[in-house]
Image: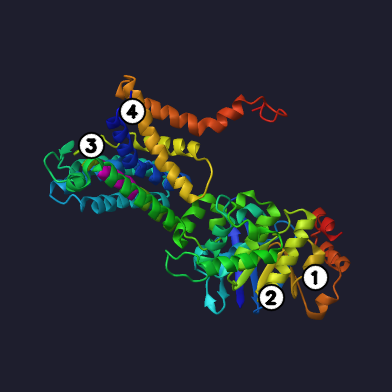
Amino acid sequence: MLTLRNISKTFNPGTVNEKTALSGIDLHLDKGDFITILGSNGAGKSTLFGAIAGSFVADTGSIQLDGRNITNLPDYKRSKYIGRLFQDPLKGTAPSMTIEENLALAYLRASGAHFPFSMITRADRQLFREKLAMLELGLEDRMDHPVGLLSGGQRQALTLLMATLVTPKLLLLDEHTAALDPATAEKVLDLTKRIVGENHITCLMITHNIPSALNLGNRTIMMKDGRIVLELQGQQRKDMTTERLLKAFREQGMENDRVLFSAE
Amino acid sequence: MISSAVIFSALELGCVYALVALALFLSYRVLNIADMTTDGAFTLGCAVSATVALAGHPLLAFPAAMAAGACAGFLTAFLQTKLNIPSILAGIITNTGLYTVNLAIMGFSSNVNLMGKDTLFTLVQPHLGAVYKLLPAAVITLAAAVLLVLFLMTRLGLSIRATGDNPDMVRASSINTAFTITVGLCISNALTALSGAVLAQYQKTADINLGTGMVIIGLASLIIGETLLPRGRLWVKALAAVLGSILYRFIIALALRMDLPSECLKLISATIVALAIGLPAIKAALKPATKGGRDQC
């Protein structure tokens, strides 16, 4: 489904601020794979997402998505197939547009409505209502409210729905629950699990929470200094515990307060 | 105090200039771009409309003017999105260049006179009687408003709205902002030029200076409308722009009634816009400092 070969990226080359953010990343995902990504701040996790989503062009290597070489495809063309959620819940929705208009935007763009003047139909609206009801946040009765009135958790849930309304080939979740309060975070995480599971979406998720990194999905990778330093799957992953993974963190010199805190 | 002739004239001009308010609703409110092309695009519409009408095609003048306005908007968008010129400067550059273009369209004369020539209004006069000016102007403006609102509900329209509303979201979604900004500015300047085109035929003359200060007049109308109808869906917002423009013309008519010299009007408009846009900052400054957050600055 997704194949990265030898992806490297150095920011500000030749200056004092030179930073190698990705260094020869090789990664392959099969259809339906759900990989969780761990690593301390600055390990290159978000940069990896940037490379996949096309926020910048990698210095070396190639990216294939569903058999198509997307290495040089601009970001706005890639995002037709790639859904992406950020930590900041305000980044994924347009605040002065209504819930329905936000969904319509996502739906009309992703559903391959080639005609630029296409509008949503009554059937589409019914679909939005059903999907919103699945979130169990009561948003289906507030479809004409501007999104700016919603809470962060509601907005993130809506963003998740928008990204998956038309099943994307790939979903990138960049700590999408980290800015929410614990109860809301858990709810959004449950929703994520359900939506990804029901639609068999190929998914990459960055998290600082070790238990959820091990519980969610079928593979876990750990990054450090722009490299993948540990990969877990199958039995090895099942046998892994938070304590042992923390130990691995320490061995890699990646111990930091944030990781320790999240492990509790 | 106010005769029916004054009321009619304010309604008529209000409808004509409402197209500029709608254009600025699109560029300034929806796309979040202060489009300085407006003045030049308005005169461009006047010049094209008068010249084409002078050649005997008063109806063809409107699509021609709109096409010309769209070209001006395209140029501003090109400077902004492809050559990375800041959006305000891009508008000013186009606006400056348009002065020469507009003169050239009018045969390097500073005005064109349509006296004795067919215009949209003289064509419909025999059929409409007293409302021969108001009705066509109102129909054009309402049609433009309806089409604009419907357009903003389409896939492309929603993309344009998102572009102005949340740049972060748009960067992560499949929207090509260079394209949406270009389409938005083309449409808004086509509307501005249409306003100029109707005005030129309405007053049977085009003048190189007609568009001067138009961006401020349009913004003043837009803001007056938003004060009247502060909340609502797209329909309400478009209606507010039209109502604001009409009310603005009534304010001007009143001011003229009170023997205010017409030379003062631009200063009044400028003051209205500065105060209205600056209001949040003024309010914040007047409010006693809470928790001392900003005192140290």
Mark 1 or mark 2, earlier in chain? 2
- In depth, the one of B215 and B18 nearer the eye is B18
Marks 3/2: CA distance? 64 Å
As helix, strand or loop, the secondary structure at mark 4 comes to helix
Query: What chain does badge 2 belong to?
Result: A
Label 3 chain ID:
B
Q: Main secondary structure of the magenta part?
A: helix
Which residue is label 4 attached to?
B253
Secondary structure of the residue carrying tag 3 is loop
Labels 3, 2: one chain: no
Q: Which type of secondary structure does the marked residue at label 2 adopt?
A: helix
Name the residue beneath numbered marker 2. Answer: A198
SS of the residue under disc 1: helix
State the extent of the magenta-drawn residues as a range: B189-199
Q: Dot 1: few (<14), some (14–19), or many (≥20) neighbours within 10 Å?
A: few
The disc at residue B208 is 3
Kindly identify the amino acid type of the residue bearing the numbered disc 1: Asn
For marks 1 and 4, give the one nearer the viewer: 4
Q: Nearer the viewer, mark 3 or mark 2?
A: 2
Q: Are marks 1 and 3 on the same chain?
A: no
Q: Indicate the quadrant where residue A26 lies.
A: bottom right
Q: Are marks 1 and 4 on the same chain?
A: no
Residue A92 vs residue B242: left or right? right
CB within 8 Å, label 3 to label 2: no
Which residue lies under the disc numbered 1?
A: A215
How far, Cα to Cα, is label 4 from label 3?
A: 23 Å
Q: Please name the residue shown 79% across and 60% down the image.
A: A254
Number of numbered discs visible in the structure rendering: 4
